[in-house]
Structures are given as C-alpha cells and as structure tokens.
Image (cartoon, rainbow, N blue to C red):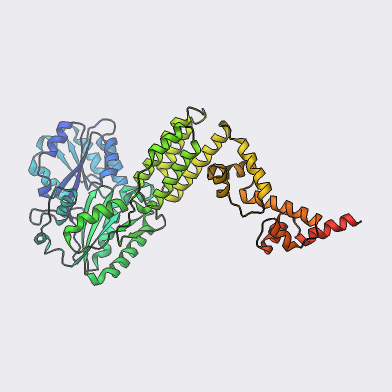
Amino acid sequence: MNTQTIRYCRVLIVDDEQIMRQGIRHMLDWESNGFQVVGEASNGKIALEVVKETNPDIIIADVVMPIMDGIAFSEVICRRYPWIQLIMLSGHDNFDYVKKTLIHGAVDYILKTALTPDMLLSVLKKASGNIEGLTLVTNQHHSEAYQLERYISGFQKELKEEDFANVLLHSSYRILALDTQSLSHGDKTIIPAIIDYIHLFFQDKPQYVVLYFNIKEHIPCFLINYRFKDDTLLKNNILICSQKLEQLYDGTFFVLSQMFRHISHIKERYTKQIAHSVSMHFYHPTETLLIQEENTQTEMERFDFEAYSQALEHKEFITALNLYITYLDTAQQANMHVHNIKNIAKNLLYNYCMELEKHIHKIEDLQHEYFSKIEGAPHYIAFQKVLDEIQNRIFTLLEEHIHVKDKRIKEIKKYLAANYKQDLDLSILADLFGLNYSYLSFYFNQHMGQDFKGYLNHLRINKASDLLKQTDKSISEISHEVGYTDHSYFCRVFKKLTNKSPRDYRRAYMEKNTL
C-alpha cells in the first residue's frame, strides 16, 4: 500500500497571557520536528471557535483562564472532539485543577515552571503517538505534502522530481478536493473523520499513491498518482467513495481535477480548477462528485454598472431591475464562484435600495431581509427563488407607490381587442409599447387575475361565442377567425372556459331562442 499519511501534527495554543503564547510558539522549530502551530486563543470560549476553523490534532491549554477556564474547556473538548489530544499547562498552586482536566480527558500536563523545549517536544510526541494513522514529517523526507503546499502557495519556486521519485511511481495525476463548506450545518468537526475514511478507502488499492495536503483550511486535498490505464477505474472508485461518505455525512461533495502528467502542473490544476470549482456544490446540490475533464469556467463580462446607475438615477427602476436579474441569471449559467455571485447580488441590491428609498418609504427591511436570504442560499435553486422573491417584492412596491402609466395599459387592451386574431405574445406587446416584459407579465397577473395567455383566450372565446350565436359560419371557420390555427385546440379552450363544446353552445343558444 503506497498511501501516504505523512503530515504535520496541528497544534493550537490557548493561554490568556500573550507572552506565554509567544514563548511557546518560539520555543521549538515546530516544522522540523513534525508539528505546526495553526492558531492561538486567549481563553476557552475563543478557543472553541478557533478549533472549528483550524481542526487541531493537539491543544496546549492553560488551566487558569478568564471567561472559560481550562476545566470547563477540557470538558467541552472531550465531549465534542474526543479525538483531539489535550495537554494542560499549570502552576504548582493549581495542580488540583489539573486533576480535574485529566478526568475530563486531558492526556498530559506540563508545569509552567519546569517547561523546557525538550520537555515540550517530549510531551507533544507522546500525544501525537495517540493519533491513529499519523506519521510526523521529519527532516529525512521533509514531507512531500509540505513541498506541494509550499509550491502551490508560491513559497517554493519549483518541485524537484528526484524528491518524489521514491513516492510518486506512476505517470498520471489528479487532485481530489473536499468542499467542507457544503457539509451539513458547516460542521467542520467531521473533517478528520472524512480524511481518515478516504485513506482507509484507498488502503487496499495499491495501484494508487495518495498524498494528503491542505492549502486552505476549508479545502483538504489529495494528490492521487496512478497509471494512465487506471483512469476510468479511479473515477469510478472515487465516485463510490463520495457516495458512501454522503450516506455518513450529509452534504459531502468532492471535486476531481482534470488529469495531468507532470507533478509541476499541480499548481496550475489547483489554481484553475480546484480553487474555483470546490464550491460548485452550489450548482450541483444533488451530486457528490464533480469531475473536471477540462477547464469549464466561462469568462463573464463585467456588469454594466454605468447603465445600471443611469437607470436608477432616471427612476427607470424596472430597467435597472431587469439588468440586475439578467446578469445574475447569466452568472449562474456560467457557474460564477459562489462567493462572487452572492457578493454581486448583495452589492447591486444595496445600490438599488438606496436609490429606491428616495421615492419609497417602506423598504427599510427589504435590504436586510434579502441580504440574509442571499447569503444563506445553500444552492442555486434556493438562490433563484430569492431572486424571484426580490423581483416580485419590488414589482409590488413599484405598483403600490409609483404611478404606472395607465394610458399605455388602456392602449394595450384596446390593441388586443382590435388585433386578437393575430399571432400575439407578450414580448411583441412589450416591444410595441415600450414596456418591460417582466413588468407587463406582472401587470396581467395582478390586475387581470390571469396571465396574458389566459386574458387573450378569454377575449377570443368571447368573440367566438358571439359568432356562434350571430352567424351560421362553421366552427372551423370561427376558430380561424378568432385567431386559432388548431381547430381541436380551439374546441378544448372553448369547453374549458364555457363548460360546453362550440357545437353544444350553439345548439343550446338556438333552442333557447326558438321557444
């Protein structure tokens, strides 16, 4: 089995005295000994938040701290994160407190007065030895994963193939990345369990070499080295793995990069595919794996903010709203990064509300309400629903507070009465009368109690009823005369609106008027 689990052991330092935290941080050459300080906190309450962000393997915490002391902190850590190794710092005069933390699950303690680099390193190694499957980075191999992280992050200019020759044995590579933001309720405490599961999954598959690395806290990655002929098998295996993990942890989502053939290409693949696509669960809410076979990111044109601002300035609120909705629709189709599309949606809405507030005084809560809904949308379906809500809410506000040009609406109704025989649709009317399509659709639904198609059908069937009563023209002739090219469709619409077929309607009228 070539799976590599060599990595730094992640350490969090918790002490209310900054000088103590700094002293511990500078006491060791952490990385050369296989450890990495991932964060600091001044009390237990703050530390609990930092734990969520940094996923430490070991926590070094003082017993006596304000707000939440080491006893309460150790109890919470033991209950919520039983896999974390907890080392307590104490003075001679508070050793009774240390006993309580040991009862709560702390694995060891250090007297501050006796703290030395050798003692600290010894206790750290003892604690790290309790972490199943972890092999510390050493100077001997200087962690292949560490080199990958430094190279991708820009701290190392190149990767030397000879440094990987004994580890990466095959010709092909892909990067597998976990989107931790998609996990149910953003629960980062399950990340170590997911990482362990992946290692175990590949443990009996010696055709793969797997290196774990982590560039950003929320994007754990695995470099998978394999034979080119196993590419299809690899994708199938990863799909199976992701589906099994989804059954265990709701919201599990992975991105698999496009294949590359040289280790030095890892930076390009990570930057162009993983960093962008790892948030694509937003656009693929029912899937567990997104496989990148090519760079599918679509270049987006910049939003025409000048046209948007001018529309708002001239009180053309429908035009501005249409620009807003259309751009965000396009952004969704282009799979714009989730963070970007949500920020754009909020920023443009802010500008809209600021201008609208000059004319309408009932929008105080609109901005805050929809900022929260935009940010909280877990996937594009929910995001689109929020956009629809915004659109309808603004239409309603405009209808209530801005005088709509009734003259144009009357002209439209007059036009339809004269031209109902023609092939008409809402877009033709909107262009003909210089009105926004969305607004015109909204108007028909709100003021006519039906959509445009329903209004036109009623108008045509009323005319057809008159012709059935007043002429002896055939039903087929009448259907064409009122604008229907399909005779059977005309009959269905007629019966739906009058509860009678055209033939029965004419017969009933004739019988009534010959008595």
Q: Quadrant of residue 86?
A: top left
- Residue 90: x %, y % from top left: 17, 36
- Residue 337: x %, y % from top left: 34, 48
Report the quarter where the C terminus lies. Answer: bottom right
Relative to 243, 433 lies left or right = right
Residue found 61% across the figure and 41% down from its top: 446
Residue 368 in view = no
Q: Is residue 309 above or below residue 379?
A: above
Residue found 66% across the figure and 51% down from its top: 420
In the foreground, 492 or 243: 492
Residue found 87% across the figure and 55% down from its top: 512
Q: Is residue 410 above or below residue 200?
A: above
In the foreground, 284 or 455: 455
Residue found 38% across the figure and 37% down from its top: 306
In the foreground, 27 or 76: 27
Relative to 108, 482 lies left or right = right
Q: Quadrant of residue 269?
A: bottom left
Residue projecting furthest to the right: 515
- Residue 207: x %, y % from top left: 22, 69
In the foreground, 172 or 146: 172
Report the quarter where the N terminus lies. Answer: bottom left
Q: Is residue 255 above or below residue 366?
A: below
Q: Quadrant of residue 252?
A: bottom left
Residue 210 in view = yes
Q: How many marks?
A: 0
Residue projecting furthest to the bottom: 229
- Residue 127: x %, y % from top left: 18, 49
